[in-house]
Amino acid sequence: MVDVSPKAVTAREARARGDVTMRPATLAAITAGAVPKGDVLAVARLAGIMAAKRTADLIPLCHPLPLTAVEVTLEPDAAHARVRVESRVRVTARTGVEMEALTAVAVAGLTLYDMCKAIDRDMTIGAIRLVEKRGGRSGVYRRAGEG
């Protein structure tokens, strides 16, 4: 594990995004609350938050961090038959929260898949990426073309 003790404790934030594409009928079932396993968006949101908090247990050599905020949003997009997953994670620490933000998106997407696989095995989880990070020595990073 990298020694971060010489680094300054600063406020840090990261945002990540990903998409789960599916059949239009699957998205309609999700938005109508008609998926047999329950409220897909609420459960996936909670799973993403829980995953961010457990990132150091999942990713080898990742520092455990005292997260101060984790937000996960899931937005249905009927025009593209997908659910857009986004996370925002904050901490005041010596290292950043990019891995926590990415883990939140990945696990929220996996949970969405798990809850809907009985009605659509063709779903695709993809385009998981860091959108923005703030804090620390490297300052601000924003992925081009992302809002």
Image (tube, rainbow, N blue to C red):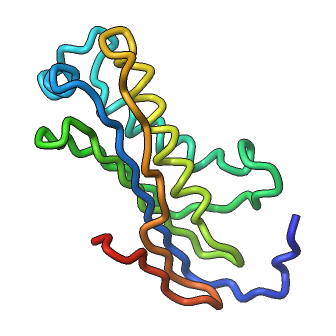
| Quadrant holding the C terminus | bottom left
Rendered location of residue 59, percent (x, y): 73, 48
Image: 80 above or below 114: below
Residue at 49 percent of width and 64 percent of height? 130
Residue at 44 percent of width and 65 percent of height? 15
Image: 4 above or below 59: below
Looking at the image, the residue that sits furthest to the front is: 122
Residue at 55 percent of width and 84 percent of height? 135
Image: 23 above or below 103: above
- Toward the viewer: 17 or 135? 17
Count of numbered badges drawn on the protein: 0
Rendered location of residue 136, percent (x, y): 62, 86
Quadrant of the rendered image containing residue 145: bottom left
Rendered location of residue 139, percent (x, y): 55, 89
- Toward the viewer: 25 or 60? 25
Image: 91 above or below 111: below
Q: Is residue 129 left or right of residue 137?
A: left
Residue at 42 percent of width and 79 percent of height? 142
Q: Is residue 107 left or right of residue 145?
A: right
Quadrant of the rendered image containing residue 3: bottom right
